[in-house]
Amino acid sequence: MGCFFSKKSKRKSPEKDLTPTTAENTTDNAVSEAPKYSWDKREKVDPKDFMLTGLKDATVGRLPGKLNGQQFVIQECENCCIFILDHSATVTIDDCINCRVVLGPVKGSVFFRDCKDVKCVVACQQFRTRDCKKMEVFLCCATQPIIESSTGMKFGCFQYYYPELAGHFKDAGLSVFNNNWSNIHDFTPVCGETNWSLLPENTPVLGYVSPPDPESEFKSVQISADAAQSVVPLTRGGRRKESDESCLFMFFAGENTTANAQKLIDEVTQKGFVLIQTKEVSMRPEDVKRVFQSSAESLTELITKGPVVALELNGDGVVRTCWEIANEVFSGTKVFVSENKNSSSGDVDNFFNFADMQMGL
């Protein structure tokens, strides 16, 4: 089996929708009264700080630390470059035309409605579009992305970096390894037509979503879309595999799990192999037995310490190469590697089918 080593619906007004979690509701009679309890001493929030509306030909957004998990609204903007470089609760984008949008990690949903000619970089739990046309999306999405009554949609894998981004992923409760960017569900398919497609591999993100204007307030933020720097691993996703040989490589919970996984990706991609998909998921003893069968006994104790991070790597000779890397680079780390190329496809299918079921995919 394997081995281990030691059309539009009626909407509410955005102002009514936007209820920051720290905002305090007061009546006219209570404004002058002192708060009765300590928890009433919360800082008041201006809803206008959490929305962008009616802008044109502008570079705007929010710097790190300005949202801190609040929800955000963008509407009726045209020809704008919008950078939301912070984590947030939810984001809705309505009636925007010819805009470039970067959204830091969103704990809940990102919903584009009635937008056209939008290019964006998005990380979120849920992604949805409705009545949109011609969008290019570089996406990291923990669940299956959904498009509805939308056409000309193109998707690529999230590739982005700014210094606070990794921390924002944690604050938003998102794993960089759970990315279903290519697994699109078209809620309103049309027979004989294709409403979405995948962008060509190696499509340069900054060719679609340019860095901020050097004269803007974002000039001090170090932004990169280099895949080697990206917080989210660059995966091939649903594209056709070039080889029939894949290998499952799995790390168990520990302080350096993310760093180790990234190091593995660097090692194998330098050798010409391809990262197909990744997942971070918790397992129970009975899950281990079902997925790993004969190897379950040796793995059961390891999965009790937290979620596992698993990677599917692809290419002729990848299993042997992964064994070599496991021995040479991760000799002091407990990992699981497919035992041989005859069983490796089964390892990959068993684990990722389990992970998808766990995540409701």
Image: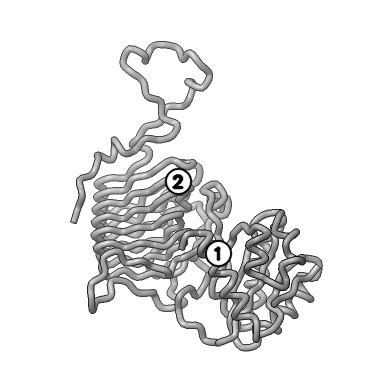
Q: Where is residue 337 shown, x and y percent of the image?
A: 70, 74
- Secondary structure under tag 2 reads loop
- Secondary structure under tag 1 reads helix
Which residue is painted at 34% across and 63% down in the image? 119
Verify CB contact (< 8 Å) between mark 1 and mark 2.
no
* Quarter of the figure that contains the N terminus: bottom right
Looking at the image, tell me whether mark 1 or mark 2 is earlier in sequence order.
2
Label 2: which residue?
A: 88
The Cα atoms of the two marked residues, 1 and 2, are separated by 26 Å
Direction from residue 357 to residue 269 in the image, left or right: right
Pick the residue in front: 166 or 354: 354
Relative to 132, residue 316 above or below = below
Q: Where is residue 206 shown, x and y percent of the image?
A: 43, 67
Q: Where is residue 104 shown, x and y percent of the image?
A: 46, 53
Identified by mark 1, the residue type is Ala
Badge 1: residue crowd in 10 Å (few <14, some 14–19, many ≥20): many
Which residue is painted at 59% across and 75% down in the image? 348
Q: Which mark is residue 151?
A: none
Single out the mark in the foreground, 1 or 2.
Answer: 1
Badge 2: residue crowd in 10 Å (few <14, some 14–19, many ≥20): many
Identified by mark 2, the residue type is Ser
